[in-house]
Image (cartoon, rainbow, N blue to C red):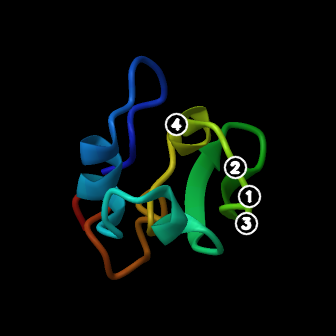
Amino acid sequence: MAVPASGAVAFSTVNSVFGYGIAMSSYVGRVYYYYDSTWGVLSGTFPGSNFPMSLFYGKSNHDEWNCACDCNCACSK
């Protein structure tokens, strides 16, 4: 499950998706994944300085859009 793509995002929601805790510093340097309709699944790294909560929109700590993965994918594989 990814963080919702819009609306208010609380750290409790972010933590339920990523599991790194409720301190912003816990996310610095961590990899995230997201789906882009043009390019497919992409990844990035949370920056090492202040970043907005909106950066969490639509992000997940694993590639849940790739149904060949061995995780809990959107396709239920």
Callout 3: helix, strand or loop?
loop
Q: According to the image, label 3 marks what residue?
A: 48
Q: Real-space Cα distance between discs 1 and 2?
A: 4 Å
Residue 16 occupies quadrant: bottom left
Element type where label 2 sits in the image: loop
Report whether 12 appears left or right of 41.
left
User: Which residue type carries mark 2?
Assistant: Asn
Q: Name the image quarter holding the C terminus.
A: bottom left
Q: Which mark is residue 49?
A: 1
Residue type at mark 1: give it. Answer: Ser
- Judged from the image, the secondary structure of the residue bearing numbered disc 1 is loop
Distance, label 3 to label 4, CA atoms, is: 18 Å
Q: Earlier in the sequence, mark 2 or mark 4?
A: 2
Would you name the residue on which mark 2 appears? 50
Give the residue type at disc 3: Gly
Q: Earlier in the sequence, mark 1 or mark 4?
A: 1
Rendered location of residue 48, percent (x, y): 73, 66
Residue in view at x 61 percent, y 41 percent: 55
Q: Amino acid at mark 4?
A: Tyr
Quarter holding residue 71: bottom left
**Cα distance in 3D space between marks 1 and 4:** 18 Å
- Checking the image for residue 38, the label placed there is none
Q: Is residue 75 visible?
A: no
Residue depicted at 47% across the width and 21% down the height: 6
Q: Residue at x 52, y 44 (%)?
A: 56
Asked if residue 57 is positioned above or below residue 50 in the image, the reply reads above
Q: Which mark is residue 57?
A: 4
Question: Is 22 placed left or right of 51 in the picture?
Answer: left
